Image: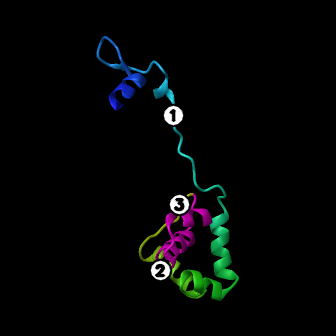
Amino acid sequence: MAKDMFERWILEDKDGDYDDELGLFDVVAERLSHRTDRGAGWRHVQQLMYESDQQCYEILRMNQRTFEALCTMLTERYELRESLNVYVQEYVAMFLEVVGQDKIVRDITAKY
């Protein structure tokens, strides 16, 4: 049955190759970005770093000065670099939330 359905979608012509008579191969699937607000992650990290030391500790499991020192150390010693879309602080905060809070990537994607 699956083979019959497959042959309905892709029809083999006389020369042995497959022609797309229904136009199915012409569809180009574009990859959509999950990140709809480019500044949301940066604002979240700034909120953690500068608003409440207690909130920073609850989410990242370290205080603000330690978080800043960790980001600086990862940048200087281990050459962690920011990309066009994500700052070093965002990388580190996302990693710490996944590890420390047992968050899944979908939750982190929504927040950052």
Q: Nearer the viewer, residue 5 or 91?
A: 5
Q: Earlier in the sequence, mark 3 or mark 2?
A: 2
- For badge 1, the amino acid type reads Val
Report the disc number at residue 28. Answer: 1
Instruction: From the image, tell me which residue sits under label 3.
Output: 83
Quarter of the image where the C terminus is located: bottom right
Hey, what amino acid is under mark 2?
Met
| Farthest-out residue, right | 51
Dominant SS of magenta comes to: helix
Looking at the rendered structure, which numbered label has been put on residue 73? 2
Horizontal and vertical percent position of residue 60: 55, 81
**Cβ–Cβ below 8 Å for labels 1 and 2?**
no
Vertical arrangement, residue 76 with respect to residue 24, above or below: below
Between the residue at mark 3 and the residue at mark 2, the CA separation in whole angstroms equals 17 Å
Left or right of 91? Residue 43 is right
Position of residue 4 measured from the top left corner of the image (x, y, whole percent) = 35, 25
C-alpha distance separating marks 1 and 3? 27 Å
Q: Quadrant of residue 87?
A: bottom right
Please give the name of the residue rendered at 48% of the width and 27% of the height, measured from the top-left corner: 24
- Identify the residue at horizontal 64%, vertical 59% (top origin): 38
